[in-house]
Image (cartoon, coloured by chain):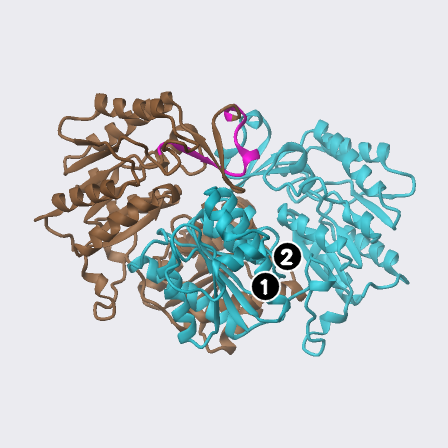
Chain colours: A cyan, B brown
Amino acid sequence: MSVLLVGTLDTKGAEFAYVRDRLRAAGVPVIVADAGVIAPPAFTADVSREDVFRAAGASYESVKAAADRGKAIELAAAGAAKLAAQLHKQGRLSGVFGMGGSAGTTIGTAAMRALPVGVPKLMVSTLASGQVKHYVGTRDVMMMHSVVDIAGLNRISRAVLDNAANAMIGMAKRPTPPAPLPEGKGESGKEDGGANSSADRPVIAATMFGVTTPCVEAARTVLEAAGYEVIVFHATGTGGRTMEGLIRDGLVAGVLDITTTELADELAGGVLSAGPERLTAAAIAGVPQVVSLGALDMVNFGPYDTVPERYQQRRLHRHNPTITLMRTTPEEMDQLGKVVAERTSASNSPTCVMVPLRGVSAIDAEGMPFWWPEADEALFQSLRNWIAPYVELTELDLHINDPAFAEACAQKLLDMLKGRKVPD
Amino acid sequence: MSVLLVGTLDTKGAEFAYVRDRLRAAGVPVIVADAGVIAPPAFTADVSREDVFRAAGASYESVKAAADRGKAIELAAAGAAKLAAQLHKQGRLSGVFGMGGSAGTTIGTAAMRALPVGVPKLMVSTLASGQVKHYVGTRDVMMMHSVVDIAGLNRISRAVLDNAANAMIGMAKRPTPPAPLPEGKGESGKEDGGANSSADRPVIAATMFGVTTPCVEAARTVLEAAGYEVIVFHATGTGGRTMEGLIRDGLVAGVLDITTTELADELAGGVLSAGPERLTAAAIAGVPQVVSLGALDMVNFGPYDTVPERYQQRRLHRHNPTITLMRTTPEEMDQLGKVVAERTSASNSPTCVMVPLRGVSAIDAEGMPFWWPEADEALFQSLRNWIAPYVELTELDLHINDPAFAEACAQKLLDMLKGRKVPD
């Protein structure tokens, strides 16, 4: 098992040699892959740039001749991803380590995103103190901010790279088995059943937000006591997308979708949208689902001054210095009811929408900043109008975080799952 | 030396206990600090929540009574930062480990940002696949995406936390000395002069971008040969801000500000603005500087579809799938010339602006996508109009990446530095 070091050995050769030497000195085997295009590599790689571009179905010579930097990076990223997936399949990979600026980060994280959760992934990047969504995606990538440019070894870059190398050494020397992944059963590693009895228990996927935590935690307790393993996804956009992938791939026995708030961000342009495929996978995979309306009272933005101008007259709430919430209006709630109704009505597996009539989040309760019964009622009425007759709509005169509501949701899902064949 | 584990032991108690046990099993001492507010902690912390809020000048009881979640998080973050800084000052810290959602990430990274570069910092976060600028800031934080919510131990969360714990074990067991930091000389650790001869060499700070790499690399070679340590900052907004902080704190002997592109992002609303303090620190600190106009031909945006609507008719270039560049116009270049002139003219230390008349970036050259001589000329003319008579303006009939231009910039800075007292 080796750590794959992948990057451009022309511009970052000295830095890659430095990290490689530290890993080797600690007894960690290394495979270095070169994805550089411009100048010759600073040292001979184990996987040459010719091989990297060949893996992407291109030739190094033609890429170099084309002199299109964007295209070269795209192909290098595709080649690195192919290479990493192949090494992993052969059981040869104990981790992937990348280092670079925009090109190096695009290439390194492409290799990382090709691997299941559980394979160590560390990217030292000049861009790690900004928007990293496109680099990290739905994987367990560690993005480390390089502070200074990766251009020469100096007192700062050495301190950063020493820590990065040590972190990778720690992960590579004590490998943990890869966990099941949204990529399908074929690629997912199996845990040792003896060491982790959870491996045999069927999985329930649940969605949570800070403001729906009491509900999800209480429901989780009930479901775990009934013999299920509950995997909770934070409704951050990425969280919802990851869950939908897991469901589509047939890895989930049941869905407890308490927190559908990402639909509000999708509708109003918030920062935590999970895209139009949210709340669609259970129908596609034929998985029973209990759906609720958690945090549909809010759309998420970053710090207060990043809220779009068109929303500055709206009801806003500073959740903390980095997160600002916007209350959804009756008009938006009306539309959201239709979205929930349409997407759940697409399922012909057991589906139930649970309605908490006294409020959909911790701050949508009497005396709290997002309490707005007319808006909530618009959501509820829209659901009643649009939902298909074969989808169960259960209205409870409870707040979403009332223990009785959580209990009812969990029990409903257990009833649906009773007697169903558990997926492998 | 211990690793500080900081987070909310009410909602994430089981997960913190899991990581703590893994660190201890590997022989790494741990200090656990509780920043929870709502329910009692799952286990007794080494630093209680009472102590954390006291460090922020507040009392736990009053915070709990106020029931203002945003305010509680703000105070917990301030307390955690105080605590971490104090432990570090006492030489007791081998790293900081955080874990959480939006609250936990705000609190954990506040503690991390209070520490110099070189102290291991690992934040496992549900928000690590998004905009992390406000969490990472100018520090060497590792942000690890938790993939699933940190709510229970299951096959996915265990795989993620195992790697996180192993990474922290690797970093804590092989500590590297902290590097000098933007926080001022008082807090910066000193390297072992015997092990790293670079510790004695005066520092030159330089700014680079992919499209100015040949210039900066060539200049670096000249300066290093002359006995300086060159620290290169990637012009990502954070990079420029970090450099300005380092200069202000008196840690830099000279500045080679080849790549002032962040000013274009500041002007036009690009994603890599370094804010209005860019290009001001050398004047404040009285440090000699050579300034050039690198990459002022471009404003940075994310993926193509994120370019603001008002700019969609502009000359755009897909640098790669995640970065789109916009060409600055003659009007913008005229304004940028004034900005560079004003900020450099504020200095009464030796200052020289070097003008590459044949193009300011790799793609601002004949036959390349951002070649627009009229726009560049607007920049140059504006500089001539506005610059103070005591600032040297040197025009060279060269492209910025011509080796002769790099040589001239480096030589100019060496001339300025000759005979000056080197800062301690």
Q: In this view, does A340 lie above or below A105?
A: above
State the image coordinates of residue B234 (x, y, percent, origin top left).
36, 46
Residue that label 1 marks: B160
- The magenta span reads B296-311
Q: Quadrant of the C terminus of chain A?
A: bottom right
What type is the residue that disc 1 sits on? Val
Asked whether the viewer can see residue B103, the reply is: no
State the image coordinates of residue A166 (x, y, percent, origin top left).
43, 68
Q: Residue B148 carries which label?
A: 2
Q: Mark 2 lies on which chain?
A: B
Q: Within the magenta stretch, is there residue B297?
A: yes
State the image coordinates of residue A381 (x, y, percent, origin top left).
81, 32
Q: Is residue A122 above or below residue A354?
A: below
Marks 2/1: CA–CA distance? 9 Å
Disc 2 is placed on an element classified as loop
At 34% across and 53% down in the image, what residue appears?
Answer: A151
Asked if the residue under mark 1 is in contact with the one under mark 2, i.e. CB atoms within 8 Å, the reply is: yes
At 68% across and 48% down in the image, what residue appears?
Answer: A240
Q: Do labels 2 and 1 share a chain?
A: yes
Q: In which quarter of the image is the N terminus of chain A?
A: bottom right
Q: Within the magenta stretch, is there residue B323?
A: no
Question: Along the line of sight, which residue is nearer the eye, B216 or A177?
Answer: B216
**Closer to the N terminus: mark 2 or mark 1?**
2
Crowdedness near tag 2: few (<14), some (14–19) or many (≥20) residues, C-alpha within 10 Å:
many
